[in-house]
Image (cartoon, helix red, strand yellow):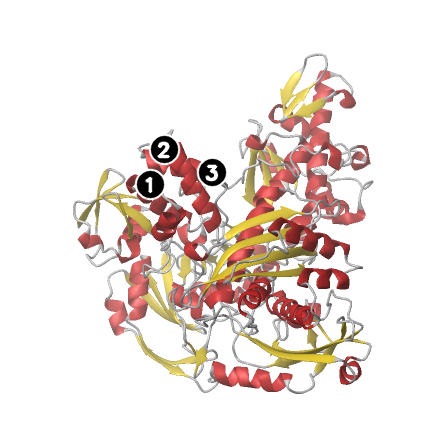
């Protein structure tokens, strides 16, 4: 560290990396001094001579480049994407790239879209696009300078390809060979100006086919470590008996039988239930099952789904409590319109049901807490743990591991499952590390569902068949109200996530009113892959289809006519229609439907083909999707996310619903909440619209268009409208 | 003590006979590639081979295994990998099947068992054999393609 001329060793690099670097990365652009952060221990060889050049890039003597990934990878692929950005700017070889998940550090690793560390809103690549490329470009610059100094040549004469630096004189070297020397070069002012990131025309990796996922190997040989796989010395596994109704409390419990189970070590009570701690997972489950608990339901939610839905239906039969959008005079225009169509819609609670039921490892000591889990919202979790334990946030360290899915469930404003794990650790005074493990049943019944909603739309078309008015009412629970994040998303009584996708209707309708009534129910709710768009897209895209048919127009042509000032929607819709062979005559018993929807700045159009089975059920044969997500970083990851979004949306549309009876969740495992299975999966084709816009998300936007395109396809085959989801065991007849 | 043969090694574990094989493999043997998803044989994340057959280890009791040879994902693709195991892994990597990856050990175990019995499965054969393996990321479309790809690799 002595070589940092004029830089106090401890202060300046750190300061630069925290402020200067983020200022550059945050979009202030080029021209700022970029910090060179050297981890003192690493530089002195404690970590095998690995040099960290900035919060995101480390280089080892053997040339391995490790990318510090600030986002949770729950399958959506940010490890691959972020490593691609660094590899591109460093002209590295894909095989030398490694990744590790970032620790909890809101200063270094904030999601620039939220100004807080967390993963969601399909923002991983979008918010990192400039930040990670800057990190790669500046690391490359100091490494090249180190080579130039050593070789006594001009920096500009050195070229890098596949991680090998070469000079026309024949000199060659690797990044690993120059890492140590480069770590001693203070980043000169203006370096970023001298080394702006690459022009798109020079991309070797970004947007190219054939770059395999970086997590392929550990995920195909059993070595990838998920929370469930973490084992610390002396650790006990914790299973919790939760109240069977939301808001229930423990009245009393008898643990005599539980304590007889071999391997059970302790039974403790925490606010969310009764905990059995055991030496093995199976013993913890068995012990939990042997508990006798009496519950106090005096403050619990005791209503059932029928009652809740009736409340929502009643709410949309009346003016909304809040108005989300009011353009023109929708009610007035409806009165004088040539034709009015009115329709009601209902959507159930949905569970995220990730393959890995929720879990969390906590090692609590007097002066620190170390958590290991698939952390999705560190900016919430870290201060929450600090508050629960009386520690300072910096005494709470979080080690992130692979997530066995999430779909939003691991990012929770109340940090519910993390809180539960910490309360268990506290209840035993941190005597040993603990791993909280939920069973599938615990996971299904734990709440934090996609809220249930009712919608009512009255829409009118004029004499030319084009829409003149759209009056839309939504009723359901708010995801943000009452949480620490309320101010972010709730404005004038409108939770943006209750109406997004409807309040900003893409179609040119001159008179538009969207009203919202927010319901209070004692069932915790949460964002679920694509959030409000999960229901608004269904309503908007099936209603626009109804209007097209009422007008006697082709559904694609009708939409295009209403999207004249929406070039990105138009391009996606045209591409999907063309690739699907839209307009071809279909056999009896077959149907084809279309939809297009924007979410998270990405446009996705889908064409769904269905066939009506002999028993009246529906089979989805093929889905053609077109996506405009700006610059494509990895086309195969985009394809995979849209394919997965189609499957995720389809499973929910076909048969998923969480229902309550007298306050108790009626579903428990995959027999009663059955996910899509392989025989349900259609052929999926994904096409990308060429774009030079900044990348936008792909994790969520594939979901919303599926259900309405499916519903529209069923209509084309049967003449029957699907307004409520899921289809369940509804049977159809070919028209 | 219960004696088991796992990935070709003789192991002795001190567990009750009614302990699911899944938890013996994960907690006692320490092989964590086999996953817990549902505990009710409804998702297939815990699939292992028992004398070559795909079984759900969460519903297979340790005391019922006897002399049967158990193979987990670590054995399927490790040093003593079967030809089906190698082909399945190569296909999975070539087609970038995985997303979150949590179900994929089970998917690969079921796929390898299918290919050891059916050298050239059709889409319908695949759907029938893989129906018990849930993937919430819905990688099904690629699972199907990868099994066809693995079948081709085995033919070659």
Q: Left or right: where does residue A258 sit relative to residue A269? A: left
Confirm whether residue A53 shows in the render: no
Which element type, helix, strand or loop, lies under badge 3?
helix
Pick whichever, A675 or A21, lies toward us: A675
Mark seen at residue B93: 3
Mark seen at residue B115: 1
Q: Chain of mark 3?
A: B
Q: If the image is split into quadrants, where does the N terminus of chain A sit? A: top right
Is disc 3 in the same subunit as disc 1? yes
Pick whichever, A352 or A117, lies toward us: A352
Circle 2 residues within 10 Å: few <14, some 14–19, many ≥20: some
- At horizontal 79% and vertical 81% (from top left) the residue drawn is A333
Q: Is residue A374 above or below residue A478?
A: above
Of label 2 and label 1, which has the lower sequence position?
A: 1
Q: Is residue A515 above or below residue A686?
A: below
Labels 2, 3: front one? 2
Pick whichever, A518 or A274, lies toward us: A518
Q: Quadrant of residue A525?
A: bottom right
Residue A5, image x, y percentages: 76, 32
Residue A99, image x, y percentages: 56, 40
Q: Left or right: where does residue A199 sit relative to residue A541? A: right
Q: Which residue is mark 2?
A: B154
Pick whichever, A226 or A310, lies toward us: A310
Confirm whether residue A175 shows in the render: yes
Labels 3, 1: front one? 1
Question: Does the CB distance between marks 2 and 1 fall below 8 Å?
Answer: yes
């Amino acid at each position: 560290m002595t070589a940092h001329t004029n830089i106090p060793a401890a202060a300046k690099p750190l300061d630069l990396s925290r402020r200067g670097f983020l200022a550059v990365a945050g979009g202030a652009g080029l021209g700022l001094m970029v910090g060179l952060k050297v981890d003192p221990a690493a530089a002195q060889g404690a970590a095998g001579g690995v040099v960290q050049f900035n919060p995101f890039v480390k280089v080892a003597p053997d040339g391995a480049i490790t990318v510090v990934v600030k986002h949770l990878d729950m399958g959506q692929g940010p490890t691959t994407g972020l490593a691609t950005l660094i590899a591109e700017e460093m002209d590295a070889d894909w095989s030398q790239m490694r990744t590790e998940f970032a620790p909890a550090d809101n200063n270094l690793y904030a999601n620039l879209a939220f100004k807080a560390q967390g993963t969601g809103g399909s923002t991983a690549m979008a918010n990192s696009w400039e930040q990670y490329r800057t990190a790669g470009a500046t690391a490359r610059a100091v490494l090249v300078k180190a080579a130039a100094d050593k070789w006594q040549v001009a920096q500009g004469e050195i070229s890098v390809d596949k991680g090998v630096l070469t000079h026309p004189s024949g000199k060659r070297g690797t990044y690993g060979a120059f890492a140590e020397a480069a770590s001693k070069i203070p980043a000169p002012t203006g370096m970023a100006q001298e080394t702006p990131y690459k022009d798109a025309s020079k991309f070797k990796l970004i947007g190219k086919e054939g770059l395999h996922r970086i997590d392929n190997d550990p995920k195909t040989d059993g070595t990838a470590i998920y929370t469930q796989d973490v084992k610390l010395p002396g650790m006990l596994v914790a299973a919790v008996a939760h109240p069977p109704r939301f808001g229930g409390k423990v009245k009393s419990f008898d643990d005599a039988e539980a304590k007889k189970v071999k391997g059970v070590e302790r039974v403790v009570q925490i606010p969310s239930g009764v905990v059995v701690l055991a030496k093995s997972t199976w013993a913890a489950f068995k012990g939990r099952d042997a508990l006798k608990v009496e519950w106090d339901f005096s403050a619990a939610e005791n209503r059932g789904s029928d009652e809740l839905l009736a409340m929502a239906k009643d709410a949309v039969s009346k003016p909304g409590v809040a108005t989300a959008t009011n353009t023109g005079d929708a009610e007035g225009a409806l009165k004088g319109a040539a034709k009015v169509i009115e329709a009601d819609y209902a959507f159930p609670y949905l569970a995220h049901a990730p393959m890995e039921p929720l879990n969390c490892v906590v090692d609590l000591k007097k002066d620190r807490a170390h958590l290991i889990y698939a952390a999705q919202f560190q900016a919430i979790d870290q201060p929450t743990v600090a508050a629960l334990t009386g520690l300072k946030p910096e005494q709470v360290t979080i080690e992130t591991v692979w997530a066995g899915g999430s779909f939003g469930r691991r990012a929770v404003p109340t940090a519910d499952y993390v809180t539960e794990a910490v309360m268990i650790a506290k209840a035993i005074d941190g005597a040993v590390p603990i791993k909280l493990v939920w069973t599938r049943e615990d996971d299904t019944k734990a709440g934090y569902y996609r809220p249930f909603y009712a919608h009512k739309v009255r829409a009118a078309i004029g004499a030319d068949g084009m829409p003149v008015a759209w009056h839309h009412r939504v009723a359901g629970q708010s995801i943000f109200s009452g949480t620490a994040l309320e101010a972010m998303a709730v404005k004038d009584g409108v939770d943006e996530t209750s109406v997004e996708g409807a309040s900003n209707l893409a179609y040119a309708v001159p008179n538009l009113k969207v009203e919202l009534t927010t319901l209070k129910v004692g069932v915790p709710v949460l964002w679920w892959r694509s959030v409000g768009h999960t229901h608004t897209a269904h309503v908007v895209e099936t209603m626009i289809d109804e209007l097209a048919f009422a007008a006697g127009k082709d559904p694609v042509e009708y939409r295009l006519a209403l999207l004249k000032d929406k070039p990105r929607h138009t391009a996606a819709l045209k591409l999907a229609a063309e690739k699907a062979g839209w307009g071809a005559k279909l056999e009896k018993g077959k149907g084809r439907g279309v939809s297009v929807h924007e979410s998270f700045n990405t446009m996705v159009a889908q064409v769904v083909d269905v066939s009506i089975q002999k028993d009246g059920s529906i089979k989805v044969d093929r889905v053609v999707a077109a996506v405009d997500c700006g610059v494509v970083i990895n086309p195969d990851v985009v394809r995979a996310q849209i394919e997965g979004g189609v499957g995720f949306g389809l499973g929910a549309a076909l048969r998923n619903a969480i229902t309550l009876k007298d306050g108790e969740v009626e579903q428990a495992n995959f027999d009663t909440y059955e996910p899509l299975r392989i025989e349900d999966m259609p052929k999926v084709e994904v096409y990308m619209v060429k774009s030079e816009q900044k990348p936008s998300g792909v994790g969520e936007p594939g979901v919303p268009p599926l259900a309405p395109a499916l519903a529209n396809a069923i209509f084309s085959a049967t003449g029957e409208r699907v307004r409520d989801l899921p289809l369940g065991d509804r049977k159809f007849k070919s028209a | 003590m219960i004696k088991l043969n796992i990935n070709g090694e003789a192991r002795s574990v001190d567990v009750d006979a009614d302990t699911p094989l899944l938890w013996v493999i994960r907690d006692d043997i320490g092989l964590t590639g086999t996953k817990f998803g549902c505990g009710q044989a409804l998702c297939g994340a815990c699939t292992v081979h028992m004398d070559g057959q795909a079984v759900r280890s969460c519903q297979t009791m340790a005391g019922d295994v006897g002399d049967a040879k158990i193979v987990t994902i670590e054995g399927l693709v490790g040093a003593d990998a079967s030809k089906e195991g190698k082909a399945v892994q190569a296909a999975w990597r070539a087609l970038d099947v995985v997303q979150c990856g949590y179900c994929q050990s089970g998917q690969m175990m079921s796929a390898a068992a299918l290919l050891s019995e059916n050298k050239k499965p059709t889409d319908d054969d695949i759907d029938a054999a893989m129906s018990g393996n849930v993937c919430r990321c819905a990688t099904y479309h690629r699972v199907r393609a990868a099994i066809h790809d693995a079948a081709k690799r085995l033919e070659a």
